[in-house]
Image: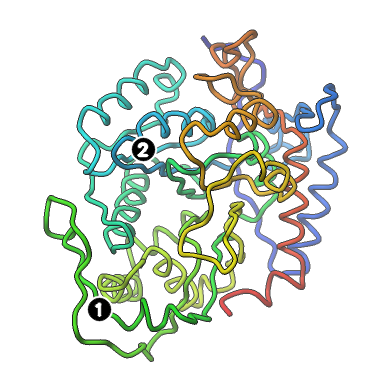
Amino acid sequence: MKRNHSSHHQERKWVIPTTITITVLFITLLLTLSVTHTKPYSNSPNFTPFHVDHSGSDDGETGLPTLPRFAYLLTGSKGDAPRLRRVLQAVYHPRNYYLVHLDLEASDAERLELAKYVKSESVMRVFANVMVVGRADLVTYKGPTMIASTLHGVALLLKKVKDWDWFINLSAYDYPLMSQDDLLHIFSFIPRDLNFIEHTSNMGWKEYQRAKPIIIDPGLYHSKKSGLFYAKEKRSVPNSFKLFTGSEWVILTKSFLEFCIHGWDNLPRTLLMYYTNFFSSHEGYFHTVMCNHKDYQNTTVNHDLHYLKWDNPPKQDPMFLTLVHFDNMVQSGAPFARKFNKDDPVLDKIDKELLRRKDGYFTPGGWCIGSGKAPCSVYGNPVVVKPSIGSKRLEKLVVKILDLENFRPKQCK
């Protein structure tokens, strides 16, 4: 059920500052000014909402920029349908777009279950912003089919929906630490050409264990999942481009991803061929394309906006997060965390204290104007947001990573 509670607005282009000094000062000033628009009405230490209406931003009524739109790719495998449904409910917002992909190892019944759920939600039907992939990709763990599937998802989002600003990839093992209202509000102050991607050119042990070995992923040509094959030969590190590695979890601009998909020069295709035989290519492809192209190497923010906990010394995969890690997750200011066991009690604590989300329902936001257990069953204008204190934690993190000492010196190094 829809009720209007704000006037319609027209999108406007966001002016990008041309120097890093202006960028950081501008973001800091706007984020500081945004606090003057707040009126807390809750005593909760983790959720202090305030009403922010971006609908008048185009004509100067509010002094606030327009809200961005995110395009999410939510991925999982066999048995992950319930977890993906929970993640979707937690990150859902009418302004965003969502592509849900269960790989070929999952059954058709699982995909059908997700599709039926999406169709059953009246809000999702009205806004038509959630898609479930019917013809799934085969994905081999650590194989190049992982980046191939991601690029396939990006291509679908570019084809099906046009008006989005950033791409975010999450798996069934991820979970948000704040509402979409928090994320949308803070990202409305961020220049739309910045790419959040943790990266480094210091390959270390990865040069010998990932760059030099030649692998073959049977998933590229078989319909059944199997392990990777290793060739006897080794290859040298390329000298025509510099290798980068980092986190596979990214927040990337539409402009950069259009370059990767449409490739108006040969770099994305050349690197895609190289990474076809590369172990864990999803941890290097976007990073290497971006840092080897002059149009994008200065747009990188060296942070993936995820909270992860690693063993010491770190293994290849992060630790599972539990209630013990809750305070550190919150204090990090990161909007997302991973990885979580299915239905771990810490997820319920996140729902209750950070998201205000009831089991089986959406995370409430300014667009939800109903009452009771399902406030989002009655919805209004999606440009009205109610950020919580979580937005202030994210603001602190963003200002820190865009500081002069952290931003330029850590770009493509």
Q: Quadrant of the C terminus?
A: bottom right
User: Which is closer to the viewer, label 1 or label 2?
Assistant: 1
Relative horizontal placement of residue 163, taking residue 383 as reference (left or right):
left
Element under disc 2: strand
Q: Position of residue 96 (x, y in %)?
A: 50, 36
Q: Position of residue 148 (x, y in %)?
A: 29, 58
Q: Which residue is mark 1?
A: 214
Residue at the (53%, 48%) spot, across then down? 320
Q: Position of residue 302 (x, y in %)?
A: 61, 66
91 above or below 42? Answer: below
Q: Earlier in the sequence, mark 1 or mark 2?
A: 2
Q: What is the spatial separation of the Cα atoms under label 1 and label 2, in whole angstroms?
A: 31 Å
Q: Amino acid at mark 1?
A: Ile
2 above or below 296? Answer: above
Is the residue marked by circle 2 packed among few (<14), some (14-19), or many (20+) residues within 10 Å?
A: many
Residue at the (33%, 27%) spot, across then down? 114
Residue 100: which disc?
2
Q: Amino acid at mark 2?
A: Val
Q: Position of residue 390 (x, y in %)?
A: 73, 39
Q: How is the image coloured?
A: rainbow
194 above or below 167? Answer: below
Relative horizontal placement of residue 104, taking residue 141 as reference (left or right):
left
| Figure quadrant of residue 19 | bottom right
